Image (cartoon, rainbow, N blue to C red):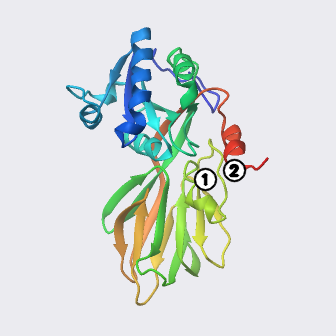
Amino acid sequence: MSSKTGSTMPLPEVKRVAVITHGRVETSGEALARLRAIAEERGIELLLPDEEAAKHGDDDGADVTEADLAVVLGGDGTMLRALRRFLGTGVPVLGVNLGRVGFLTSIEAGALEDGLRRAFAGELELVELPALEVSAGGERWLGVNDMVVASSTIGRMIELGWAIGGEDLGAQPCDGLICSTPSGSTAYNLSNGGPVLVWGLDAMAITFVAPHARPLVVPRGRALTVTNQTADVSATVIADGQQVHELAPGDQVEARLSEHRSLLATLPESTFFSRYRRTFVSE
């Protein structure tokens, strides 16, 4: 296995594989059976965490932190769940697409056997993906995709003060703000006209929703501070799609690139730009 940044990653031979699947058994059951057959053929031990073992009728769950590789059977939602689970562990995450878009996945369902055989033989490249660290009210959350600050009242605009690295950038009337990682930049950020961050960039994108401001790309080491300057409306802080905090008027939230990283495993031909063209470019 090798890293997209060009350095060789000292990873062991693939002997133990963690398995994370789509929430519905009917979606992932057949793919799991095919994965089990490949693993038996190659003498690889499959490790299913407790909730996956219960979902698929296995007797006992296993410690997935001992895995050499994690295989995800699902779409981008399942991939994000797995990337969060293995954040900072050094376990690479490889996706088999059972969803609609599957931008983060590397293998299509119809090519499962060939793709996994190649992966288990070490024919993989790894991409380091930075995460976000979000803090407010004395609490802290990690996100692999994005942080969103939005009005807590549907239909009401809010006014958000913002600063980068302690430098005040004024206040912005808007419907919300998105702070995304490279892996999250092709999601909500992109749909709001934000910049796409190519994998390998150690930066975060800041994009307002319905604003009068341009997006920014901010490097590691500079924190984003957002203040709810709306006099009579609270704002909701959302990390990776989960509501985590309410900002009363005057309250602040901070987001910065975390020291923790996730590892995305890909087949050599499944590059960022090939995925981008397949997903976003009309022929």
The mark tally for this picture is 2
Residue 277, numbered circle: none
User: Which residue is found at the position 67% from the left and 28% from the top?
Assistant: 269
Element on which disc 1 rests: loop
Q: List x then y, in percent, for residue 174.
A: 56, 79
Q: Is residue 86 visible?
A: no
**Residue 126 drawn above or below residue 78:** above
| Residue assigned mark 1 | 186
Which residue extends farthest right?
283
Residue 172 sits above or below residue 243 on the image: below
Three-letter amino acid code at the position of disc 2: Phe
Query: For this view, does 144 lie left or right of residue 202?
Result: left
Q: Where is residue 237? Give x, y as percent.
A: 41, 68
Residue 143 seen in render: yes
Q: Residue at the spot x=50%, y=34% of the render?
A: 95
Mark 2 residue element: helix
Q: Nearer the viewer, residue 226 or 149?
A: 149
Q: Nearer the viewer, mark 1 or mark 2?
A: 2
Choose top left, top right, bottom left or bottom right for residue 164. Answer: bottom right
User: Mark 2 = which residue?
Assistant: 280
Question: In the visual, does 108 lie left or right of 43?
Answer: right
Q: Residue 160's spot in the image, x, y percent?
A: 51, 79
Q: Nearer the viewer, residue 46 or 221?
A: 46
Gap in Å between the C-alphas at discs 1 and 2? 9 Å
What amino acid type should be assigned to the residue bearing mark 1? Thr
> Which quarter shows the N terminus?
top right
Given contact means CB atoms under 8 Å apart, are the residues at marks 1 and 2 in contact?
yes
